[in-house]
Structure formats: structure tokens, C-alpha cells
Image (cartoon, rainbow, N blue to C red):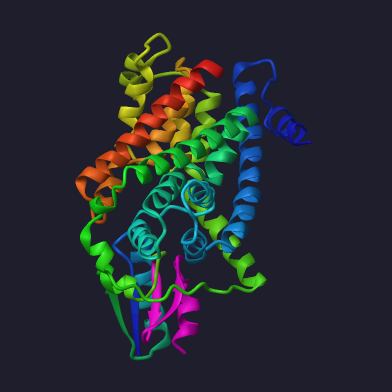
């Protein structure tokens, strides 16, 4: 049905010829754009509704009674429905720690929150299919859970900045929203997000349809192409300090794939960009001592590299 | 009446601050609007998701950028 609309629009109304390259590309662009925006609107709204049932204050309450392992899994899952605003990272971290949420569990949450979200899921799903989307989510969760467990086991509590344990926190009230308020919230959130992300999404789809020409990441491809066994670590190393939301990585992902980079390396790059970033490091430095900060970044980066190699063998 | 905007300086926090200023201007009331960026003060309010809006010491909204109309309602 959607295909028919795209065909009608491009070949009948706009009079492009279906046999031409240009006609086919524009048809693909229209079809994919409508499909992705529709999927995004529905799923972001749906996830925002779920989110309204799990505000950070409630997440904190759920996680504060959990032990390791189960706690890490819960934290990673809850991270998916919690949007990551860098400035909230500090109050959130302090709130968790002060409530007795184990350090490792808090880290599982910190990893999954920026890396796994409904935007990444929908875009990967819409552009690359179920297998890729679910592989990303699945391995992302594994990375979040594992890094959290490892950090927990290393007993790094004394490498959290001292004041964090001394801050007096007020009681965390879980706001009770009526169903109507939740709908309102989900609607505002979805619209806001779409408004912020639409250029990236269009760019992502556009590049997919019109791959050609100069790619600024030439350097990246030269050192991280399909024959280079060091491609994955290099891609991750380059991705770590960079910052972007999931949607912003998609145009680059498309371009890199068009230039022949293996899917695994590309997904590893995407994870490295979203999960870790230099701005995030600067912010986390407020609550973590250098050793723990470096350990956190190191473990997650290593886990992503591992996953990248794994992807390349199975995809 | 006093409005406090809790946040550590990201664009959302600034937007909420601007919205609050606008709401006060439109309401014509004498309301002080201040930004609170000190983490100790933010935690003391029990807030984990910034930006947050506090009116006369009570947290009215958190984790979102309240719209001008919503803020006007709160300071009526």
C-alpha cells in the first residue's frame, strides 16, 4: 500500500521514469522516508508511553533493592526506556548511588541509556531489517550488563568522587501522572524528538539512496576497510570521543556501508559513538575519579570491539 | 514568589529558564526566577532528571521543559 503511494507519487505525479536510475532512487527515497517517519512516530510515541511509567525516580526505587546480575539486567533494560540527557547524568548517578543501587548496576544503566533507544531500533529496523536491529539491541544489552558486572566485581566504589557519598538528597518523589497526562507527555516528547531529528533521518535515508561522491570519513575507510583486521578497534577508537545521538550516526553508517565497510565494523562504530563520548567523559568526571572513568570507558570500548568482531563473523 | 530552575547548563535547562522568564513576563506578577546549577542544591530537592522547575521550594515539574502556559498556570 505504501509502495503504491510511493510509485504513484514519483512515477505518475512527478513523472519520473521507473527505468531510470534517478527515478528508482527518488522512488526509494520517498518510500523509505514515509515508512521510517511513520514507524518512528508510532514507536517513539509507544515507547514514550512506556517511559511515562518508568520515570528515573521509579527506576531508582526498582534498582535499589536489586542484587548484582539481576540488577544489571534490569538496569540495562530500564536504560532503554530512559532518554539520556547528559546534564541529567550527574543527578541521576548521585541519586542511584545514594539510594544504594550497586555501582555496577548503575553503570549498566549508564551504558544502555544512550546506546540503546527506540530511535536506533526503528532506524536500523527500517533501513536494514529485523536481524540487524535486533542484533544491535541484543548485543548492546549484553555489553551493558557485562560492563556493569565487571565494574561491580572490581569493587571500584572508592573511585567515585567523595562528595557523592556526602551529598544529602531530598526524598525522591515519584510523580503520579494521570493517563491523559501520560498521553500528553508522550505526544510532546514524540513531536519534540521528531522535530529535532528529522534532518538526520532524511540525510540517513538520502545517503542510502544516493551513495556516491566524496565521503568525509575517507580516512576512516582507508584504515578500517573490509580487508583490515584492525578495522574494528580503529573504528571504535575513532567513535569513542565523538558524540552523536543515534539518528545522527545513521547517515554516516549508510555512507560507510556504501563504501564497503563490513556491517559489524559499522555497528561497532555506531555503538562507540553513542555509548561513549568526550563530552560525556567531561560530565562524568564530576562524579568519577579518573581511574574509574578510564576503566569505564576502557571496558565498554573493549566490549564493543569484541562485539564488532563477532558481528563481522555472523553477518 | 520564587521560581528556581534546576539544571546544570544544558540547552534544555536554558530553554526552561527562558520559558519561565516569558511566563513571568506574560503574567505580569512579581516573581523571581533563578537558575540553580549547584549539584548539592539540586540533589537536596530530590531531583534526578533535570531540568526541573521549583516554585516556592516545591518541585512542580521535572525531566521536561515545561511550556510557557504550563508555567503560567503554576504561578497563578
Q: Is residue B70 magenta?
A: yes
Q: Nearer the viewer, residue A273 or A304?
A: A304
Percent of width and height locating residue A258: 49, 19
Residue furthest to the top in view is A227
Give the number of callouts. Answer: 0
A311 with respect to A101 (left or right): right
Percent of width and height locating residue A47: 60, 53
Q: Residue at x 44, y 87 (%)?
A: B75
Residue A90 vs A247, above or below: the answer is below
Q: Is residue A170 magenta?
A: no
Q: Residue at x 56, y 35 (%)?
A: A138
Q: Is residue A163 visible?
A: yes
Looking at the rendering, the stretch of residues picked out in magenta corresponds to B51-76
Indicate the quadrant where residue A90 lies. bottom left
Indicate the quadrant where residue B43 lies. bottom left
Percent of width and height locating residue A10: 68, 30
Q: Nearer the viewer, residue A65 or A6?
A: A65
A8 with respect to A167 (left or right): right
Indicate the quadrant where residue A220 lies. top left
Residue A152 vs A231, above or below: the answer is below
Q: Is residue A263 visible?
A: no
Q: Residue at x 52, y 61 (%)?
A: A62
Percent of width and height locating residue A212: 46, 18
Q: Nearer the viewer, residue A65 or A120?
A: A65
Residue A301 vs B28, above or below: the answer is above
Quadrant in which the C terminus of chain A is drawn: top right
Quadrant in which the N terminus of chain A is drawn: top right
Amino acid at each position: 500500500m505504501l509502495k503504491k503511494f510511493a510509485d504513484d507519487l514519483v512515477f505518475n505525479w512527478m513523472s519520473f521514469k521507473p527505468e531510470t536510475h534517478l527515478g528508482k532512487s527518488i522512488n526509494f527515497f520517498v518510500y523509505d522516508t514515509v515508512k521510517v517517519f511513520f514507524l518512528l512516530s508510532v514507536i517513539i510515541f509507544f515507547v514514550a508511553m512506556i517511559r511515562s511509567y518508568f520515570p528515573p525516580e521509579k527506576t531508582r526505587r526498582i534498582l535499589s533493592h536489586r542484587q548484582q546480575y539481576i540488577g544489571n539486567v534490569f538496569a540495562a533494560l530500564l536504560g532503554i526506556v530512559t532518554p539520556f540527557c547528559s546534564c541529567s547524568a550527574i543527578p541521576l548517578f548521585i541519586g542511584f548511588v545514594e539510594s544504594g543501587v550497586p555501582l555496577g548496576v548503575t553503570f549498566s544503566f549508564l551504558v544502555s541509556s544512550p546506546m540503546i533507544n527506540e530511535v536506533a531500533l526503528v532506524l536500523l529496523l527500517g533501513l536494514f531489517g529485523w536481524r540487524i536491529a535486533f542484533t544491535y539491541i541484543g548485543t548492546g544489552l549484553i555489553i551493558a550488563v557485562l560492563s556493569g558486572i565487571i565494574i561491580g566485581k572490581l569493587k571500584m566504589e572508592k573511585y567515585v568522587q567523595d562528595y557523592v557519598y556526602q551529598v544529602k538528597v531530598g526524598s525522591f518523589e515519584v510523580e503520579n501522572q494521570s493517563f491523559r497526562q501520560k498521553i500528553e507527555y508522550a505526544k510532546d516528547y514524540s513531536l519534540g524528538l521528531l522535530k529535532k531529528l528529522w534532518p538526520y533521518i532524511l540525510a540517513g535515508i538520502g545517503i542510502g539512496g544516493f551513495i556516491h561522491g566524496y565521503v568525509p570519513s575517507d580516512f576512516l575507510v582507508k584504515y578500517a576497510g573490509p580487508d583490515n583486521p584492525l578495522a574494528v578497534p580503529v573504528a571504535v577508537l575513532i567513535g569513542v570521543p565523538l558524540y552523536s545521538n543515534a539518528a545522527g550516526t545513521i547517515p554516516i553508517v549508510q555512507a560507510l556501508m556504501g563504501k564497503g565497510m563490513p556491517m559489524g565494523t559499522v555497528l561497532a562504530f555506531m555503538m562507540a559513538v553513542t555509548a561513549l563520548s568526550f563530552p560525556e567523559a567531561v560530565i562524568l568526571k564530576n562524579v568519577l575519579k579518573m581511574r574509574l572513568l578510564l576503566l569505564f570507558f576502557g571496558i565498554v570500548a573493549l566490549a564493543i570491539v569484541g562485539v564488532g568482531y563477532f558481528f563481522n563473523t555472523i553477518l | 514568589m520564587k521560581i528556581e530552575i534546576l539544571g546544570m547548563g544544558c540547552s534544555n535547562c536554558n530553554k526552561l529558564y527562558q520559558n519561565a522568564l516569558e511566563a513571568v513576563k506574560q503574567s505580569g506578577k512579581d516573581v523571581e526566577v533563578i537558575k540553580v546549577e549547584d549539584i548539592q542544591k539540586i540533589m537536596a530537592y530530590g531531583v534526578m532528571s533535570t531540568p526541573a522547575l521549583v516554585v516556592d521550594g516545591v518541585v512542580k515539574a521535572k525531566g521536561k521543559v515545561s511550556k510557557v502556559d504550563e508555567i503560567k498556570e503554576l504561578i497563578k
